[in-house]
Image: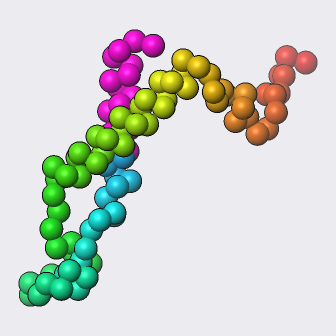
Amino acid sequence: MQWTSVVAIYALFFVSSAFVLLPFGVKTADEAGVEKVPGQADSAPVSFSVGRHALKAAIMAAILTTLYVLNYIYGWVTADDINVFGSPPNFDK
């Protein structure tokens, strides 16, 4: 596998991880015991640290990319392992 492919896979895992991790660790004003600003939604987060969120996503993406590359090298799970429908139909007959 080329290093550019690994970088592209890491970028995909990073963006996916960033979206998956969004709801974790977020507190509303009621949960944090802070007074709400007039007009603020009840579900609005108190604070959001982009740097901390990016670091969490980077760590998760690094772990997932490592597992993906190791699976590519050693072949732990192949396409035949996840084929739940059996062999594809033969349309030549």
Residue projecting furthest to the left: 37
Verify whether residue 63 appears in magenta.
no
Verify whether residue 8 appears in magenta.
yes
Vertical order, 18 against 77 (above or below): below
* Quarter of the rendering containing residue 93: top right
Q: Please indicate, yes or no, whether residue 41 appears anywhere in the rendered image.
A: no
> At 13% from the left edge and 84% from the top edge, which residue is drawn?
34
Residue 16 in picture, x, y percent from top left: 37, 45
Q: Which residues are magenta?
A: 1-16
Residue 56 in picture, x, y percent from top left: 28, 48
**Where does the N terminus fall, quadrant-wise?**
top left
> At 33% from the left edge and 24% from the top edge, which residue is drawn?
7
Q: Nearer the viewer, residue 12 or 90?
A: 12
Residue 68 in picture, x, y percent from top left: 49, 29
> At 79% from the left edge and 28% from the top edge, which residue is drawn?
88
* Quarter of the rendering containing residue 48: bottom left
* Quarter of the rendering containing residue 29: bottom left
> At 43% from the left edge and 37% from the top edge, which residue is drawn?
64
Q: Nearer the viewer, residue 74 or 8?
A: 74
Is 39 left or right of 87, judged from the image as shown? Answer: left
